[in-house]
Image (cartoon, helix red, strand yellow):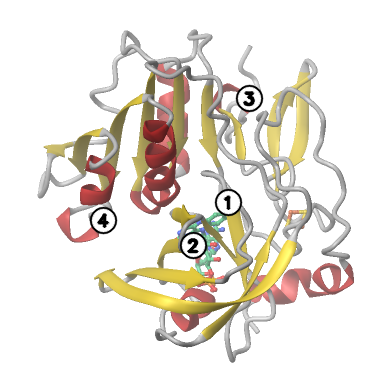
Amino acid sequence: MDEADRAVKGEGESMNAMNPPERSDTASAAPSCVPDAPRMLTTTVVGMARHAPTIVELVLAHPAMPDLQPGQFVHLRVPEGEAFLRRPLSVADYDDGTHTLRLIFRTVGVGTKRLSAVRPGDRLDVFFPPSGGFPMDIVPSGGRAVIVGGGLGVAPLLYLAKALNLRGVRVRARIGFAAVEEVYGLERLSAHAEVELWTDDGSAGRRGRVTDGLSPEEPFQALYACGPEPMFVALKARFRHDGRPMFAALEARMACAVGVCRACVVPVRADGGIVHRRVCRDGPVFPLQSLVFPGEEEWA
Ligand SMILES: Cc1cc2nc3c(=O)[nH]c(=O)nc-3n(C[C@H](O)[C@H](O)[C@H](O)COP(=O)(O)OP(=O)(O)OC[C@H]3O[C@@H](n4cnc5c(N)ncnc54)[C@H](O)[C@@H]3O)c2cc1C
Ligand code: FES
């Protein structure tokens, strides 16, 4: 059992996954599509690929796969191991024709290493929490959206770009990685968006941070982001006085994933103050400007 498992084991055991509490009904939770009820399925691994030594892609199938929206995540049981808690991963694609779900993840610890060892034909136990997705209705057909992704944060944006594009939205994607070896999803994203690639060391695309070339004058009806915290901080600062809708998909350490244990709370600005919201149940997508990062508590 790893450190995170030990920290929250008791709370995780007592949660009732099939009767999750309601989402917090405030402006700090992004309006979005939420599935009717959580579901648990034993899926079959039908595809597995390695993009880089530590970046793995899995495709899972099940005939009763629920309709998954961009921005939502699934909670996977780690096969055969000491990892007691499930691990959350974003939906990188969902195909309702083949009933397949695509996940892309980095192997960072015991859970993701075990998940990276599965092979086609293996079974994986997947829980589908009633999380919210990226609100897409706010961009009309013919409108423009900007998506900004950093590192593994690009994974959910692949599905978002596809879904927006299918709705007739023109998508401009800026994606950033540490170096060329870390780049993935470029081809898939280019099928649905005009893509600008950035790397920290200039080994692919433009050299610098993904937020460097982003102008506040950029035309869009909505901006969507997923990536590391410094990327959100830079985006928030760049668009601080911009009233257009902007959304960020967050990560947090999770246990129950249904809003019971509060392992995943983050501070957000709401109702004139700072409150705590659960990434699993109230998110993982939040309005970007509502997020409060370390040192920002005093912002007006
Ligand atoms: C809603 C959501 C969606 C996510 N989507 C993806 C995705 O699409 N692709 C992907 O690669 N990862 C994603 N993550 C992160 C992923 O869940 C963690 O990397 C994974 O749970 C780590 O498990 P582990 O057992 O391998 O690592 P552990 O042994 O638990 O931890 C290893 C290291 O990773 C760090 N870590 C673990 N979990 C997180 C976390 N949630 N956030 C930040 N650091 C963490 C730990 O602090 C430690 O340093 C997502 C997380 C959330 C909450
Ligand atoms: S993980 Fe338990 S409340 Fe979010």
**Disc 3: which residue:** 290
Which of pointers 2 and 3 lies earlier in the amino acid sequence?
2
Describe residue 141's horizontal placement relative to residue 50 as left or right.
right
Q: Nearer the viewer, mark 2 or mark 3?
A: 2
Helix, strand or loop at mark 4: loop
Q: Position of residue 57 (x, y in %)?
A: 37, 68
Which of pointers 3 and 1 lies earlier in the amino acid sequence?
1
Q: Residue at x 44, y 54 (%)?
A: 92
Q: Nearer the viewer, residue 154 or 127?
A: 127
Marks 3 and 1, how far apart in space?
25 Å
**Disc 2: which residue:** 101
Q: Nearer the viewer, mark 3 or mark 4?
A: 4
Q: Nearer the viewer, mark 4 or mark 2?
A: 2
Describe residue 174's horizontal placement relative to residue 149 as left or right.
left
**Disc 4: which residue:** 184
Q: Residue at x 57, y 22 (%)?
A: 289
The reply to whether callout 1 and callout 4 are in contact (CB within 8 Å) is no
Which of pointers 1 and 4 lies earlier in the amino acid sequence?
1
Q: Position of residue 157 (x, y in %)?
A: 41, 43
Q: Nearer the viewer, mark 1 or mark 4?
A: 1
Which of pointers 4 and 2 lies earlier in the amino acid sequence?
2
Marks 1 and 4, how far apart in space?
22 Å
Q: Few, some or many C-alpha atoms within 10 Å of disc 2 (few <14, some 14-19, many ≥20)?
A: many
**Disc 1: which residue:** 68
